[in-house]
Image (tube, rainbow, N blue to C red):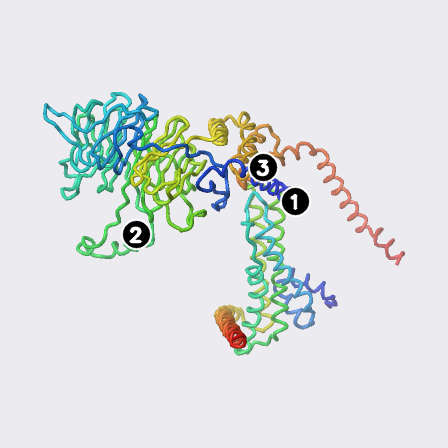
């Protein structure tokens, strides 16, 4: 049973939200590469949703473009979640390894990305009155992802549903802490850099005299 | 992606057009003419008006002005200038030749003098002159020879608080002979009298802007006691600064407040409701967008005067930046002119403005003179196109708008105007192109809808055939697979 390739496993997981991740776990069918591809797609989806949306729905302020917010909304948030979830769940007897959490989370994102990409695509062919179709795509994709996501985290740690929800809440707290520390670290490094630079400037001035 | 390419090339062409045309006209101005794009960013533009000359008291022949504060152009083609510190009203004709000076008035055989008159108005029906005799705390109705007919004084009504000073600043009358007075210390709207001088009430009060402070107060008021409430600060609206009445009898008001943006400019119907918003001008920011580009400092606009032009243009004077903003009757920005400074066309303390024909007159209280702006060739074309457009002649406005783009490729309204003309011709594809450059989402949406409908109509049979073929193909494929013929063949091959 279930002699699937890695790609077929992805399909299996997405269309079997409740037992799919269990199968994935026992068969070790997850692929880190496919997962990374999905995260890259997430990045592209964020970009497309903001910049390539149909003109009749949304016009981006295209005099300025900054890639950092999109990087943050995809890669940074995703990996922060993975690390935070691993850190929290390990403390609470979760069985998932870092890699498995990463794979399950990424797999769960597929319907969300697809829904939004379809919505973005449709926005070029529909008029404002037909926005309901786009909205439907986006809502269905998101809801599907939420189900997959909870089921994926539940399966990877072998938790009960309530423990999963409770730990997702804790993960959120941990994410905030991690991001806060990251910002702090960046600011500190910036100051160290400025210090070193001004030191260098001072020294060059001494030598010149 | 070809759409993007097209857009870029249009933008590049537009930029080129600007840089070529800008050399000719804008160099005349003491300031850089600019306009606002769809994002509210300032973009270089052509001058719609050019400062032509200045007039002061000596050129008129009545002696130098001293802090003049109001100018009014009557329907019988005379200027009435309220020369405040000289306590007089100077009357001139269109070309600023002295006609008369009103400084000594007569009431029941007694001499009356003006004291710092701040506003003047002439009723177009009765030809009566109304003067805000500010420091004497009254409004005077007289004829042009200075014979006083009636005083409008501080109302002795319980609606008008005793403690308030009565310092009238501007006055207008309507068709029915009602007199409206802007009193500086009153925030409830214009003080309104009937033609006999009876106090009727207030007209057209501003609303209180829902700032966080106001909301916070409202929250506390719901839980505080009666006594606490009496002691707390009341949220009062800002009283408006000036007003004007158009020929249809609508009153326009401006409010000079740096903090409050609600109701900065209003067009009031007889009920006192703002109808500019129902006309669809809800998103217009009047005056400069903060921070004002092309100025060295960033200050909020302070709108001190309003005047309605012959085609219903709304001209607004910004005291802080010394600029005149001209909007069309639907509150779309047309031109910006003026600035702070000493040169011709700039101001130090712009007090009031007036329009006549294709000219705008601005009075400066520190320079003690009047600056005359005349509409440029570019301004004429834009005005023509705008008028046609606003009256619904989209087709006829096509050519003028095209001309506008020859002068100024940044003029957003021209793209919309051309787009509308094309839309009416059912040339949806090109209309979409122009709407896209104008960044007008709603109009683009409509044009796209039309374009799509035409497309579907044209290729309807082809699309139906295509769908039917696909359905048939799928059914046949499934049948073959179910009966096993397809499968067997495949297996044999393998």
Label ID, residue A142 = none
Residue indicated by mark 3:
B434
Residue situated in front as seen by the camera: B363 or B304: B363
Instruction: Note whether A135 is above or below B128 in the view shown.
Output: below
Which residue occupies 79% across, 51% down?
B482
Q: Where is residue B4 in the image (x, y as percent from the top left)?
A: 63, 45
Chain letter of the residue carrying label 2: B
Q: In this view, does B65 lie to the left or right of B474?
A: left
Which disc number belongs to residue B214?
Answer: 2
Distance of mark 2 from mark 1, alpha carbons?
49 Å
Up-down relation of residue B304 to residue B308 (above or below): below
Q: Residues within 10 Å of mark 2 (few under 14, many from 20)?
A: some
The furthest residue to the front: A209
Q: Which residue does the numbered mark 1 point to in the structure image?
A: B5
Observer-nearest of A75 and A133: A75
Q: Which residue lies furthest to the right in this view?
A: B492
Q: Are callouts 1 and 3 both on one chain?
A: yes
Q: Which residue is drawn at 62% across and 46% down?
A: A122
The local crowd at label 3, few if under 14, some if 14 to 19, many if 20 or more residues have their Cα within 10 Å, is: many
């Amino acid at each position: 049973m279930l002699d699937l390739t890695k790609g077929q496993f992805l399909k299996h997981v997405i269309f079997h939200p409740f037992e799919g991740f269990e199968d994935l776990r026992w068969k070790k069918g997850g692929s880190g590469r496919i997962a990374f591809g999905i995260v890259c797609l997430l990045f592209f989806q964020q970009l497309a949703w903001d910049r390539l949306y149909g003109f009749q729905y949304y016009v981006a302020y295209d005099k300025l473009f900054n890639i950092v917010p999109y990087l943050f909304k995809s890669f940074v948030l995703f990996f922060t979640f993975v690390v935070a979830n691993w850190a929290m769940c390990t403390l609470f007897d979760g069985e998932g390894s870092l890699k498995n959490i990463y794979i399950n989370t990424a797999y769960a994102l597929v319907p969300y990305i697809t829904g939004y990409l379809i919505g973005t695509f449709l926005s070029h062919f529909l008029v404002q009155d037909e926005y309901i179709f786009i909205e439907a795509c986006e809502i269905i994709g998101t809801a599907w992802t939420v189900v997959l996501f909870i089921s994926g985290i539940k399966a990877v740690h072998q938790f009960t549903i309530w423990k999963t929800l409770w730990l997702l809440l804790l993960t959120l707290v941990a994410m905030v802490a991690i991001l806060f520390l990251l910002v702090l670290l960046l600011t500190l490094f910036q100051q160290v850099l400025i210090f070193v630079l001004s030191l260098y400037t001072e020294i060059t001035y001494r030598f010149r005299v | 992606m070809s759409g993007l390419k097209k857009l870029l090339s249009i933008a590049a062409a537009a930029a080129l057009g600007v840089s070529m045309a800008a050399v000719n006209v804008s160099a005349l101005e003491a300031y850089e003419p600019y306009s606002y794009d769809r994002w509210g960013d300032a973009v270089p533009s052509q001058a719609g008006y050019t400062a032509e000359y200045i007039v002061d008291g000596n050129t008129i022949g009545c002696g130098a002005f001293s802090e003049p504060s109001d100018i009014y152009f009557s329907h019988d083609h005379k200027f009435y200038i309220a020369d405040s510190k000289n306590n007089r009203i100077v009357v001139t004709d269109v070309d600023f030749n002295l006609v008369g000076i009103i400084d000594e008035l007569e009431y029941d055989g007694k001499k009356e003098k003006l004291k710092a008159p701040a506003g003047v108005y002439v009723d177009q029906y009765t030809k009566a002159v109304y003067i805000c005799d500010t420091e004497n705390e009254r409004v005077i109705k007289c004829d042009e020879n200075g014979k006083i007919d009636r005083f409008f004084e501080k109302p002795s009504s319980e609606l008008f608080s005793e403690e308030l000073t009565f310092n009238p600043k501007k006055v207008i009358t309507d068709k029915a002979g009602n007199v409206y007075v802007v009193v500086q210390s009153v925030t409830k709207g214009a003080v309104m009298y009937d033609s006999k001088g009876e106090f009727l009430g207030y007209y057209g009060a501003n609303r209180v802007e829902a700032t966080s402070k106001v909301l916070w107060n409202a929250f506390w008021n719901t839980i505080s006691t009666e006594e606490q409430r009496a002691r707390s600060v009341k949220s009062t609206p800002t009283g408006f600064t000036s007003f004007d009445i158009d020929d249809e009898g609508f009153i326009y008001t401006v409010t000079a407040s740096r903090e409050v943006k609600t109701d900065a400019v209003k067009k009031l119907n007889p009920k006192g409701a703002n109808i500019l918003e129902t006309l669809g001008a809800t998103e217009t920011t009047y005056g400069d967008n903060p921070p004002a580009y092309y100025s060295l400092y960033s200050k909020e606009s302070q709108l001190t005067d309003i005047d309605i032009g012959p085609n219903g243009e709304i001209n607004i004077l910004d005291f802080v930046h010394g600029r005149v903003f001209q909007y069309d009757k639907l509150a779309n920005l047309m031109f910006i002119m003026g600035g702070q400074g000493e040169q011709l066309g700039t101001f130090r303390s712009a007090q009031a403005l007036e329009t006549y024909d294709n000219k705008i007159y601005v009075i400066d209280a520190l320079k003690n003179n009047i600056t005359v702006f005349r509409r440029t060739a570019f301004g004429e074309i834009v005005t023509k196109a705008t008028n046609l457009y606003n009256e619904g002649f989209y087709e006829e406005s096509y050519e003028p708008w095209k001309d506008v783009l020859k002068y100024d490729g940044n003029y957003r309204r021209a793209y919309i105007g051309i787009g509308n003309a094309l839309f009416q011709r059912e040339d949806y594809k090109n209309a979409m192109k122009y709407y896209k450059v104008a960044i007008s989402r709603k109009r683009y949406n409509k044009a796209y809808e039309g374009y799509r409908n035409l497309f579907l109509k044209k290729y309807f049979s082809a699309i139906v055939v295509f769908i039917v073929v696909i359905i048939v193909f799928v059914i046949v494929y499934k049948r073959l697979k179910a009966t096993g013929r397809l499968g067997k063949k495949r297996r044999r091959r393998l």
